[in-house]
Structure formats: structure tokens, C-alpha cells
């Protein structure tokens, strides 16, 4: 259970934050009203430097898929660290990287040949996908979607269209990137009723971009998050993904799915695109794949248009210790945690939707598995966004010992470790509703 020994933040936490301000880059998006100074973790629990025990509904931004310091992950890391920590997969070979690539290739869709490129993070995986798409197709243009978050390095940042602060003063960005409306059904970009929608937002690609801006045979790839993460935990409708796959295949455009946040069992399937029963050309992964160790990767269809030796590489990508952690992560996810994500996600979603009848601030509740968003609004009729109220709820949860993060302009994200059980979700939601009630009363 949550156990608070001091008001949050406690004296040791405040001292650590003061030290941080002198030496650590202040570009990070830390919330000054919910500052957790972590000392250790176990399962879904975090202990801060003052000994307070907090319930974690964020999982390090959906990274700690198997929970904090899962004993089997720790054992795999220790055993590999005793054998080999680094040897650079760019120039040499080692078995953990080969074994992980074999596992990932087996998970990717389709019967054709596939290969894996290893990196250290999600943004690097996306950078690799940008380069590979242009290399394979010899085409210059790339399409992404409004609300997307694909990373912060210059290429992936060019695809990102989530918040202006992420772009400000960094231009000019990568040329040849175009954006289209994402199917944000609660706030439909085409002002359609979801009950009668014919996925008109997809028509923007054919009726505007392909007719007025670039010909489809100049487009190398379309990048899409099956569930937008930083953009607000917004799932793309199944029909949208299916029609997008048909359109890209028709024009010889590569379909790249960014599963950095939605992958590795978080939605109740290994990848979120599987809910639409499609086969993308390239999949980008990171975050939960190694249960907290830095690892990103891209798996792609391999053919005679593949890039040549020396055209792209990464010194630390596919580090043997990270690969060992990833192999054990996949074991755990495939042997129970993925199913647990589905069951616990159903319970979480049902509880939140029940709260909607009691709380005018709870707008849309959406997601899959343990990737659930709750949009905070001024009232359910106007649906006016209430970002200040959302931020106040995050802070109120923190003061009660619940760690939760926002996303988008006004959404709360529920992304606990996949090991969470129903009692822990119930405790967290009880705290969340108390915080919500207090914020609504003020």
C-alpha cells in the first residue's frame, strides 16, 4: 500500500532537487508540482529518498514493462554483465544480439525475410527508419500525422507534431516532411460523428497531399503511431489503419509503425497494430523492450533494396547487457504479462468509465490494455480542454502518493507496469478519484 512518511516532497527530496538545478540540464520536462526523487523500486512501487512508498502508474513513461527491478531481469543483467558488457555490434558479433534479432524477426508479421537494426532509444530507431525508407525507395518525401511524437533528434523531431515547445528555435528541420490529420475521433478533424464516420480524415492524403503537394510516387513512407502516445493516448481506428495500409501498398509507400510506447505487450498484444490485423513494412521499438535498459530497434522487410554495408550503424546499439534484459523481458511478456495487461486494462477502463457518471471533468476515456488515456474537460457537453485542471490532478495524485503523467494538451495517461494486479489498480484509482474530487471542488 501507499505509505507516506513525510509530506511530498520530503526534506531529502527537496535537497536533491536543489542540487539538480545547479548541474543538470533544465530542458527536461519535469513537473515542479510532482517531483519524485526515486531511490529504489520493486514491482509497481517506488520508494523516494525520504522513505515514502509511492504507487507508480507511469512505469518510467511505459518503459518498466516487467515492473521495477524484476528479479528475473536483474538476474539476466547480472549474468550477462559477468560475461561481456560491450563489444560493439557495429564491428563484431555476440550471441545475445543475434538471439534477440531472431526473436524479434519471429514476432514481426509476414513470411518474408526480415532484419533488425539495433539502436539505443526510440528516437534512434525512428531515425534509422527514415534513412532506410529513403534508401529503399529512392523517394524524398515522408508523411506523418498531427499530434505525433516520434522523438527529439532532428529527423524524428521533424515527424513530431505534438507541441510547439519541442520545435521552437530548432528549425529548419528535415525537409520533405508533410503532416496529415490523425483520426482523433473525440475531436474529429473533419467534424464528423464517429457513428457515421467513413474515415474522411484519411481522404486528406489523397485529396490534398497527393493532389496539391506531392505525387504519391514521390513519398517514401508514412509514419504512424497505432496509438498516439505523447499526443494524448489516442488509438487510431482499426478501419483507418487498414485503409492506410491498403493505400500505402497501392502506391509503393512504406508503412512504418512507431510502437515505441505501445509495443511489447502493453495493449494486450505484442504490438498495437495487431489489433487491426495489418502487416507494416517497418516497426520501431524501444521503451519497454529491455525493462529499463536503453535499447531501441527497427525490424524491417529485407529485399534487394536494402542498404549496403557501412551506410548506417550504432556503436552502442544492441548492447549485450541490454539484449539479455530484452530476451528475458520477452519471455515474461509472452508468458503471462501480455494477458495480464489485457485483463487489468479492461478493469482499469471499466472503473474509469464508471467514474465518468460522477465526474464532469472526465471526458473521453480511451485506449487498449494498460495504455489508457482520460481526457480532462471543463464539462462533457462543451468538451473544452482543461489543461490546468489536468495538471492540478497530477499534482493532487502525487501529494497522495500516486505517480501519474499527463500527455497531449489535457489528457492523463494510465501506463502502469504490466505486472500490476487488480488490488493495486483499485488502490490507485481510489487515490485518483479522491484527487479528482478535490480538484473539481476548487
Image (cartoon, grey):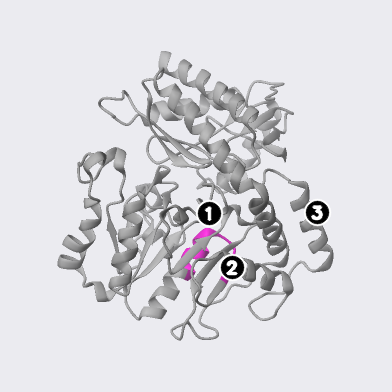
Give the mark nearest the N terminus, 3 or 2. Answer: 3
Q: CA distance from mark 3 to mark 1?
A: 23 Å
Image quadrant assignment for residue 279: bottom left
Residue farthest to the right, as pictured: 82
Other residues around mark 1 within 10 Å, as few (<14) / some (14–19) / many (≥20): many
In contact (CB < 8 Å): disc 3 and disc 1: no
Give the labeled residue for mark 1. Answer: 263
Q: Mark 3 or 1 closer to N-term?
A: 3
Where is residue 304? Give x, y as percent. Answer: 45, 86
Q: Earlier in the sequence, mark 2 or mark 1?
A: 2
Q: Position of residue 258 (x, y in %)?
A: 45, 58
Question: Marks 3 and 2, Cα distance to the nearest angstrom?
Answer: 25 Å
For the residue carrying disc 3, how many other residues have a C-alpha within 10 Å: few (<14), some (14-19), or many (20+)?
A: some
Question: Quadrant where the N terminus lies?
Answer: top right
**Stretch in magenta:** 117-128
Query: Which circle, 3 or 1, is nearer the viewer?
Result: 1
The spot of residue 30 in percent (x, y) is: 53, 40
Front residue of this view, candidates 254 and 128: 254
Q: Which residue is mark 3?
A: 75
- Could you say which quadrant of the image residue 103 lies in? bottom right
Which residue is labeled 2 in the image? 106
152 w.r.t. 138: above or below: above
User: Looking at this view, is 418 or 313 the one in front?
Assistant: 418
Q: Secondary structure at mark 3?
A: helix
The quadrant where residue 155 appears:
bottom left
Q: Give the label, 2 or 1, closer to the camera.
A: 2
- Residue at 84% in and 63% down: 82
Q: Is residue 58 above or below residue 361?
A: below
User: Could you tell whether 273 is left or right of 35 in the image?
Assistant: left
**Are dots 2 and 1 in contact, CB under 8 Å?**
no
Disc 3 or disc 2, which is closer to the eye? 2
Amino acid at each position: 500500500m501507499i505509505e507516506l512518511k513525510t509530506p511530498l516532497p520530503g526534506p531529502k527530496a527537496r535537497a536533491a532537487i536543489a542540487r539538480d538545478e545547479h548541474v543538470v540540464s533544465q530542458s527536461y520536462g519535469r513537473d515542479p508540482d510532482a517531483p519524485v526523487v526515486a531511490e529504489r523500486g520493486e514491482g509497481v512501487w517506488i520508494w523516494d529518498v525520504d522513505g515514502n512508498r509511492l504507487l507508480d502508474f507511469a512505469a518510467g513513461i511505459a518503459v518498466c514493462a516487467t515492473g521495477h527491478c524484476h528479479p528475473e531481469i536483474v538476474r539476466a543483467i547480472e549474468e550477462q554483465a559477468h560475461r561481456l558488457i560491450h563489444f560493439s555490434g557495429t564491428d563484431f558479433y555476440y550471441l545475445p544480439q543475434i538471439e534477440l534479432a531472431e526473436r524479434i524477426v519471429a514476432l514481426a508479421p509476414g513470411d518474408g525475410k526480415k532484419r533488425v537494426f539495433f539502436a539505443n532509444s526510440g528516437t534512434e530507431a525512428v531515425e534509422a527508419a527514415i534513412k532506410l525508407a529513403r534508401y529503399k525507395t529512392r523517394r524524398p518525401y515522408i508523411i506523418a500525422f498531427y499530434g505525433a511524437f516520434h522523438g527529439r533528434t532532428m529527423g524524428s523531431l521533424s515527424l513530431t507534431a505534438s507541441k510547439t515547445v519541442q520545435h521552437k528555435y530548432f528549425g529548419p528541420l528535415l525537409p520533405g516532411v508533410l503532416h496529415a490529420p490523425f483520426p482523433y475521433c473525440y475531436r474529429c478533424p473533419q467534424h464528423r460523428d464517429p457513428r457515421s464516420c467513413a474515415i474522411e480524415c484519411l481522404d486528406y492524403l489523397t485529396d490534398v497531399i497527393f493532389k496539391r503537394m506531392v505525387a504519391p510516387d514521390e513519398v517514401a513512407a508514412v509514419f504512424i503511431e497505432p496509438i498516439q502516445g505523447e499526443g494524448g493516448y489516442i488509438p487510431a481506428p482499426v478501419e483507418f489503419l487498414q485503409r492506410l495500409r491498403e493505400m500505402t501498398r497501392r502506391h509503393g509507400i512504406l508503412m512504418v509503425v512507431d510502437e515505441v510506447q505501445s509495443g511489447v505487450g502493453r495493449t494486450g498484444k505484442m504490438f498495437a497494430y495487431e489489433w487491426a490485423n495489418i502487416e507494416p513494412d517497418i516497426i520501431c521499438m524501444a521503451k519497454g523492450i529491455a525493462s529499463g535498459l536503453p535499447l531501441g530497434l527497427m525490424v524491417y522487410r529485407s529485399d534487394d533494396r536494402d542498404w549496403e554495408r557501412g551506410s548506417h550503424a550504432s556503436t552502442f546499439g544492441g548492447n549485450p547487457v541490454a539484449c539479455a534484459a530484452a530476451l528475458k523481458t520477452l519471455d515474461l511478456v509472452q508468458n503471462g504479462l501480455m494477458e495480464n495487461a489485457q485483463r487489468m486494462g479492461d478493469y482499469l477502463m471499466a472503473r474509469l468509465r464508471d467514474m465518468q457518471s460522477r465526474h464532469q471533468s472526465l471526458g473521453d476515456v480511451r485506449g487498449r490494455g494498460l495504455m489508457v488515456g482520460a481526457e480532462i474537460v471543463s464539462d462533457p457537453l462543451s468538451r473544452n480542454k482543461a489543461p490546468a485542471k489536468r495538471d492540478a490532478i497530477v499534482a493532487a495524485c502525487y501529494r497522495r502518493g500516486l505517480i501519474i503523467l499527463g500527455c497531449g494538451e489535457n489528457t492523463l495517461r494510465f501506463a502502469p507496469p504490466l505486472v500490476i494486479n487488480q488490488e493495486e489498480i483499485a488502490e490507485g484509482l481510489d487515490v485518483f478519484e479522491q484527487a479528482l474530487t478535490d480538484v473539481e471542488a476548487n
